[in-house]
Image (cartoon, rainbow, N blue to C red):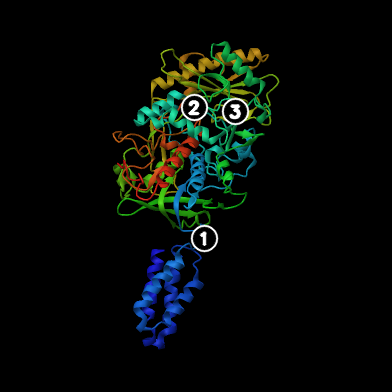
Amino acid sequence: QAHLFFFFTFTCCLSFLAPLFRQNMSKFASATRSILRRSAARLSPSPPTAHLDRAVYKASSATCALLGSSLAGVAALGVWFFKGKKLDGCGVDVAEADFVIVGAGSSGCALAARLSQGLPNKKILLLEAGEDDDVPEIQTAVDYFGKVEKVFTSDRDWGHGTEPQKGLGGRGLYWPRGKVIGGCSSFNTMVWMRPDKTDLDNWGVAMHDMSWSYAGMLPFFKRAERHVLASTDPEVHGSDGPIAVARLDHPQHNKAAHEVTHTFVAAAQALGHRLNNDFGRSLDGVGINDVCAVGGKRCSAAAYLREVGAYPKSGSTGAKSGNLEVKLMTQVTKILFDESKQATGVEIVHAKDFDEQKRHTIHAREEIILCGGAVNSPHLLLLSGVGPRDQLEEFDIKPVANVQGVGKNLQDHLHVAMSYRLPNGLKPHPQSNICEGSLFAKTTPLAAANDLQVHIGTVFFEPDGFYPSGEGFTLTPTLINSKITGEVRLRSTDPFEKPIILPGYLEDMADKITLREGVKLCRKLGQDMLKRLGGGEEVYPGLNVSSDADIDDYIRKHANTVYHPACTCKAGTEGDPLAVLDAQFRVRGVKKLRVADASSMPLHVGCNTNATCVALGERAAATLLEEYSKPEGESTQEKGRA
């Protein structure tokens, strides 16, 4: 717009001299039109040439005597012309918004909807690189085979992957990440699980701010959910949120929990683990998982957009309702800053321009909030000059802010498949989410907190790549309190090239021992389950894998991610050298830029992460609403800026 306005003004000023050069007027007008068109093409493959032609014509008929007043008129005309004009070829209805949110995943959908509701006079723009979620294998989790075949590695998947990992015998792991409305909440097995009270209280301690503790975070978890237990336990569960939640054995899911899952619960109780009928109250013992679905249909974070009328329909490139606009297939490639290190806008590439990689700019009048997740948010910050100075300079990126923690402190959950066949097979209920139950346990009495989560899956998974291959059930001992942190780094300055992911899996002996003890625990569970179910076989790892060395070798060859990366833009105190954000989600060292997603967790949580990501979106929205709802002059925007 700045280039267009400059050329517009410059051309019009020159055209005042046209009466002195009437003989060359035709050539002059043609030349000026050409200049304007080439300038417009820098922002749009389809510039509004008809408007530009009229502007040249009007300017050409002006007189030198009116030069002073005409210059003012030209400026006013330029403001009128460009304000609110469509950024052609990009599909964005306005080239600016008050708040620009990057990523329509679990956190981004919640944040956008709540800001739209709470700040009706502000324009909210939600940008998503992926497509709509109208895919049968997304809308239901029971067809895990179909999801692996048609969704994973498709255009709706970012398709990240780690570098070869020493602790995994040189294997690299595939990391599916949702490139679709709803983000990973459109990919997961719909388990809705809050962190344990201890985990969230540890957040409060780490932040030196008890509003981040369990008591402080509870309202945001409740605000997100519409839980069937809200009427009987309103202190713990919410009743009015967009996310419909009930245990899998509830009528809301047509009591879809399989007999095998109930057998899993009984076998764990027989080993001394307590029955837990509500994981929303605590994460201890064994029970049926809460699932965010209704009648077998997924209830992802896109439910927030449905609630406010801005849910993109099948085949659309976006949706708009009131002050909220959602744009799909629009990838943000860079955050733009002014000389004062204030984030002023984003550079984008629309789907139709991906091949040519034409860049467009969207201006943010108030703030930019990244909700891209544990991989994409730090990657975008690094590409934009926010991160460790040495890494930025290695790629000749001019540092905007030397923030050492960007991309660091990566944490994930690692599990290994133990797979069983039954004589009569196993067919999940049509409304099953596959991951039907959980056990939380300590692998040693000396552990300060539960260090293991076991999932029961009603599909037989091949341990190599965690690929579904038929009927049976799978137990997955899962490491939920790893002692190792990894890193997300730049691979190049090309925003379309995947970053380097270095999780550091199993580089600590304590992690290996925890998973080994988890395999032993699950073997006891599995053998008891087979007896209760009338027979069957442990196919993987197989009873011949019995010594510690054999179990360790099996884990090294077959351990896989549970898809829960987090903490790569962690929130923390000013004294924490790896803290990227303050308690208000603001990025340190710059202005008007925040991050709210899995990457912003101060510490990793010991359970499935989707509910936490949604709650972080709710919390970020509440933080912004508190600041921007205040009368002029009372904003806390710059308080606590590092």
- Residue 360 screen position, x and y as percent: 45, 58
As measured in the structure, the alpha-carbon distance from the residue carrying label 2 to the one carrying label 1 is: 43 Å
Q: Give the amino acid type for the residue marked by disc 2 in the picture.
A: Cys
Q: Which residue is mark 1?
A: 89
Q: In this rendering, which labeled residue sits more in front, label 1 or label 3? A: 3
* First-in-chain label (1 vs 3): 1
Q: Is residue 168 visible in this depiction of the protein?
A: yes
As measured in the structure, the alpha-carbon distance from the residue carrying label 3 to the one carrying label 2 is: 25 Å
Can you tell which mark lies on residue 231?
3
| Within-10-Å neighbours for mark 3: few <14, some 14–19, many 20+ | few
Q: In the rendered image, which quarter is residue 486 located in?
A: top left
Identify the element where label 1 is drawn: loop
Front residue (pair 336, 397): 336
* First-in-chain label (2 vs 1): 1
Identify the element where label 2 is drawn: loop
Q: Give the amino acid type for the residue marked by disc 3 in the picture.
A: Ser
* First-in-chain label (3 vs 2): 3
Q: Is residue 169 visible in this depiction of the protein?
A: no
CB under 8 Å between discs 3 and 2: no
Q: Quadrant of the C terminus?
A: top left
CB under 8 Å between discs 1 and 3: no
Considering only vertical position in the picture, is 156 above or below 562?
A: below
- Residue 93 screen position, x and y as percent: 51, 58
Give left or right: position of 502 versus 274: left
Q: In the rendered image, which quarter is residue 528 located in?
A: top right
Front residue (pair 447, 547): 447
Q: Give the amino acid type for the residue marked by disc 1 in the picture.
A: Gly
